[in-house]
Image (tube, rainbow, N blue to C red):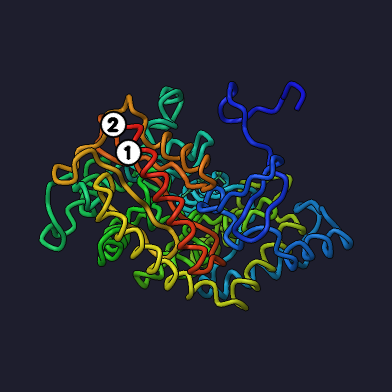
């Protein structure tokens, strides 16, 4: 290829050029085949080249590809909002945007506007958890506890308070569940008392922590405690289901694992399974009613919001998930994948922890299984594993985990929900090969 002018994550690295995708596989222009073991960025949930999703794009493009939301509504966007309302629960409205960062930032703005409309203008801080990622734009990053992504911009980020994550493998209190009595969740109440609920609009959390923790699943009962505290202190609860939504964890939305919902929900990624950009903020009826009876307008929006082509794709993705029962089977396949990883752990002691739900599995690496001490930062183990896996024809996703200030290493394994057990075996074989190669490098 001639000199590139495309800005890629690393400016001095040569990236393989992808030629085409088929199911769980991607092929580059040299003919090399990869198992897409991370669905890209946990996005290509149906795999690549699904004909009926491709047809939904062309069918809609033949009708109309773009209309402006201040001038018109459109049928696919209306139908999609209706469908999401059926899936999430009665009464929820959809605000369509283009990325997960916009979805969480829109949730933040709506939360602040909601309290303004109720005459509580001081309620404008957003609480979140350390080890969380809600997006790369300034508002979304202000709510994120992801040191690496924040570090360059800390001086211009909002100073939003954070509480400890439900990281049972490395409990910040040195406690164990259930004896811990949800110390980490109860930190929310302490933070609210310190800051004053009259200054707080909302608390945001990923139901299962993705990129910033490597599929950290809270213990049962955690979200009940969180929600009780939010209700007690008049604080909205925002669920960031950008990574976990649309079947990834074996439920359509991950909070279903704990039988609960949120006041505002950010969704994205798997919503279009990567076929077009679309994301959304779901807004509960109580918030909509307040704004309807007040200013009547949510002060946000983007040129491409409620794009008919993207909405048609998202509808088609939901139809495909339902028709092929991919949400329920994600749970079964995830259990199979986890069992295979546990078998590997017996042979490769650098695997410290295996966690996650459905087909969102995190693997955390340690230099010592007993002390759980991570590898030194200089080794950059996560990057080594990711690039070695890619050389071996396996794509997995980097996640940060470990000890605050010291760091650690984790990856996400999250293949398309369409993967078969035989293909999981192939994925495991490539992952094991990668561990063998890494073992040699570390000697
Ligand atoms: N929220 C979560 C939980 C995410 O994992 C991500 C992206 O990885 C985002 C928000 C931001 O989404 P986007 O990259 O589409 O802006």
At x 37%, y 30%, the residue is: 380
Numbered circles on residues, count? 2
| Residue contact between numbered discs 1 and 2, judged by CB atoms under 8 Å | yes
Up/down of 346 relative to 174, above or below: below
Residue 66 on image: x %, y %? 82, 53
Tell me: 9 left or right of 154.
right
Question: Alpha-carbon distance for marks 1 and 2?
Answer: 6 Å
Which SS class for mark 2? loop
Q: Which residue is mark 2?
A: 443
| Residue 122 visible from this viewpoint | no
Residue located at (38% from left, 56% from top): 208
Considering only vertical position in the picture, is 226 above or below 5? below
Q: Is residue 366 above or below residue 255?
A: above
Q: Which mark is residue 439?
A: 1
343 or 403: nearer the eye?
Answer: 343
Whether residue 411 is visible to the viewer of this picture, yes or no, is yes
User: Residue 333 or 228: which is nearer the viewer?
Assistant: 333
Alpha-carbon neighbours of circle 2 within 10 Å: few (<14), some, or many (≥20)?
A: few
SS state under label 1 = helix
Looking at the picture, how far across and down is residue 91, in whole percent?
54, 72
- The residue under the point 52% across, 69% down is 420
Left or right: 415, with 32 as reference point: left
């Amino acid at each position: 290829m001639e000199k590139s002018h495309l800005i890629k994550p690393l400016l001095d690295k040569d990236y393989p050029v992808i030629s085409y995708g088929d199911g769980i596989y991607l092929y580059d222009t040299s003919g090399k085949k990869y198992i897409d073991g991370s669905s890209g960025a946990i996005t290509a949930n149906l795999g690549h080249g699904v004909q009926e999703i491709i047809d939904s794009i062309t069918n809609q493009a033949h009708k109309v590809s773009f209309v402006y939301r201040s001038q018109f509504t459109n049928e696919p966007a209306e139908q999609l909002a209706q469908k999401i309302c059926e899936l999430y629960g009665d009464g929820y409205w959809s605000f369509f945007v283009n990325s997960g960062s916009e979805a969480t930032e829109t949730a933040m703005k709506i939360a602040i506007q909601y309290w303004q409309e109720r005459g509580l203008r001081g309620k404008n801080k957003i609480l979140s958890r350390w080890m969380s990622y809600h997006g790369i734009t300034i508002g979304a990053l202000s709510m994120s506890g992801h040191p690496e992504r924040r570090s360059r911009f800390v001086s211009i980020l909002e100073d939003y308070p954070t509480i400890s994550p439900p990281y049972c493998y490395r409990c910040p209190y040195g406690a164990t569940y259930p004896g811990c009595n949800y110390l980490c969740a109860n930190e929310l109440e302490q933070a609210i008392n310190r800051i004053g609920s009259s200054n707080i609009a909302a608390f945001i959390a990923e139901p299962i922590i993705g990129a910033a923790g490597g599929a950290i699943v809270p213990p049962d009962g955690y979200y009940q405690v969180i929600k009780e505290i939010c209700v007690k202190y008049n604080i909205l609860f925002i669920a960031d289901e950008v990574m976990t939504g649309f079947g990834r964890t074996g439920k359509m939305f991950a909070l279903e694992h704990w039988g609960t919902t949120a006041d505002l929900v950010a969704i994205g990624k798997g919503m279009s399974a990567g076929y077009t950009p679309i994301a959304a903020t779901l807004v509960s009826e109580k918030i909509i009613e307040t704004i309807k009876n007040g200013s009547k307008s949510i002060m946000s929006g983007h040129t491409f919001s409620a794009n008919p082509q993207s909405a048609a794709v998202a509808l088609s993705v939901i139809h495909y998930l339902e028709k092929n029962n991919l949400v329920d089977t994600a749970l079964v396949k995830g259990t199979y994948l986890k069992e295979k990883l546990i078998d590997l752990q017996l042979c490769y002691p650098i695997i410290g922890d295996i966690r996650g739900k459905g087909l969102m599995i995190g693997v955390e690496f340690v230099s010592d299984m007993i002390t759980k001490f991570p590898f030194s930062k200089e080794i950059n183990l996560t990057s080594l594993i990711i690039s070695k896996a890619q050389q071996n024809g396996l794509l997995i996703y980097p996640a940060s985990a470990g000890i605050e200030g010291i760091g650690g290493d984790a990856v996400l394994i999250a293949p398309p929900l369409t993967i078969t057990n035989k293909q999981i075996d192939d994925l495991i074989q490539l992952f094991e090969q990668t561990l063998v190669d890494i073992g040699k490098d570390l000697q």
